Image (cartoon, rainbow, N blue to C red):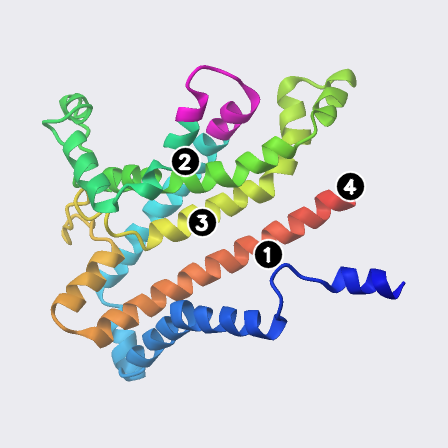
């Protein structure tokens, strides 16, 4: 018995206190200290100055544009990301591995390059932008362009969140539903979708949080017009930094940080409760 206990206690990486110390040190240097610096710079403003800053018309419009466009893009990513994950898992076809690798291209591609490419493609001189411009729909330098850019950078989050769950999903549940007389639509929404929902919600939350604070891919295609409400909040922060107004920039960044944390917190709570209901069933 003692020999077995000693064998179970052996770890591949020995030294719990050492590894825990390294983990905390890295976490502090990479996450906690930078976040604390945002708080420190923000507190240089008085409460009245802070409130006046974040309730300014251009700041509120920027927050509204970022949140609404990111929400729409995350919803679309949830739909098309689920379809992409389904195709990659359920079907075999030539070029499948290539397509699977291309899903992560937005992660590898510099966001500024993506923004320049998309703004050129969807301008009135590019394709397919010229086609839409011909029927009276402008994409570049509008909120539609922002949504397209956010879809581009957010689609991998949904696909990679749903894909592993689909791979582990037992086909017996689906077959049992068909045997009991369920249609394909009913089998999907009653059997498959509840299993995928927590992962889909995770992908939605990650895409939403990333989209709200995105800068590189939207800075060129948005147009950055205060008049047309196409300024995103990250651009307003950059404006403050260019003017050496670090307190105002960090104050806006603090609000952006709080919004992202609250969204992820709510989505995680929903995901946990949904997972518990599914496990109970």
Identify the mark at residue 136; answer none if there is no mark. none
Name the residue rendered at 23%, 67% in the picture: 56
Q: Are marks 2 and 3 in contact (CB under 8 Å)?
A: no
Q: Secondary structure at mark 4?
A: loop
Q: Which residue is mark 1?
A: 269
Q: Which residue is mark 4?
A: 281
Q: Residues within 10 Å of mark 1 (few under 14, many from 20)?
A: few
* Gap in angstroms between the C-alphas marked 2 and 3: 13 Å
Q: Which residue is mark 3?
A: 206
Whichever of callouts 2 and 4 sits on the residue coming sooner in the sequence is 2
Whichever of callouts 3 and 1 sits on the residue coming sooner in the sequence is 3
Q: Are marks 2 and 4 in contact (CB under 8 Å)?
A: no
User: What x and y, as percent, mark residue 118?
Assistant: 21, 35
* Gap in angstroms between the C-alphas marked 4 and 3: 27 Å
The tally of labels here is: 4
- The magenta segment is 83-98
Q: Which residue is mark 2?
A: 76
- Of residues 256 and 242, the one drawn nearer to the viewer in this rendering: 242
Whichever of callouts 4 and 3 sits on the residue coming sooner in the sequence is 3
Whichever of callouts 1 and 4 sits on the residue coming sooner in the sequence is 1
Q: Residues within 10 Å of mark 2 (few under 14, many from 20)?
A: some
């Amino acid at each position: 018995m003692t020999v077995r206990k000693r064998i179970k206690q052996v770890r591949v990486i020995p030294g719990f206190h050492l590894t825990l110390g390294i983990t905390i040190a890295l976490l502090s240097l990479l996450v906690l200290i930078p976040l604390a610096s945002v708080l420190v710079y923000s507190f240089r403003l008085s409460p009245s100055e802070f409130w006046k800053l974040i309730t300014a018309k251009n700041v509120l419009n920027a927050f509204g544009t970022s949140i609404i466009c990111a929400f729409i893009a995350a919803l679309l990513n949830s739909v098309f990301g689920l379809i992409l994950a389904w195709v990659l898992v359920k079907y075999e076809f030539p070029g499948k591995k290539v397509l699977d690798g291309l899903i992560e291209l937005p992660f590898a591609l510099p966001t500024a390059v993506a923004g320049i490419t998309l703004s050129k493609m969807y301008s009135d001189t590019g394709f397919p932008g010229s086609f839409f411009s011909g029927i009276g729909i402008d994409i570049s330098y509008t909120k539609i362009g922002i949504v397209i850019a956010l879809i581009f950078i957010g689609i991998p989050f949904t696909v990679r969140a749903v894909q592993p769950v689909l791979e582990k999903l037992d086909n017996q549940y689906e077959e049992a539903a068909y045997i009991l007389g369920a249609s394909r639509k009913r089998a999907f929404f009653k059997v498959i979708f509840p299993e995928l929902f927590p992962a889909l919600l995770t992908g939605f939350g990650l895409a939403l949080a990333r989209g709200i604070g995105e800068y590189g891919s939207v800075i060129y295609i948005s147009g950055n017009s205060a008049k047309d409400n196409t300024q995103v909040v990250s651009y307003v922060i950059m404006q403050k930094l260019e003017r050496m107004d670090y307190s105002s920039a960090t104050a806006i960044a603090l609000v952006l940080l709080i919004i992202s944390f609250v969204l992820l917190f709510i989505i995680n709570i929903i995901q946990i409760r949904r997972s518990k209901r599914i496990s109970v069933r």
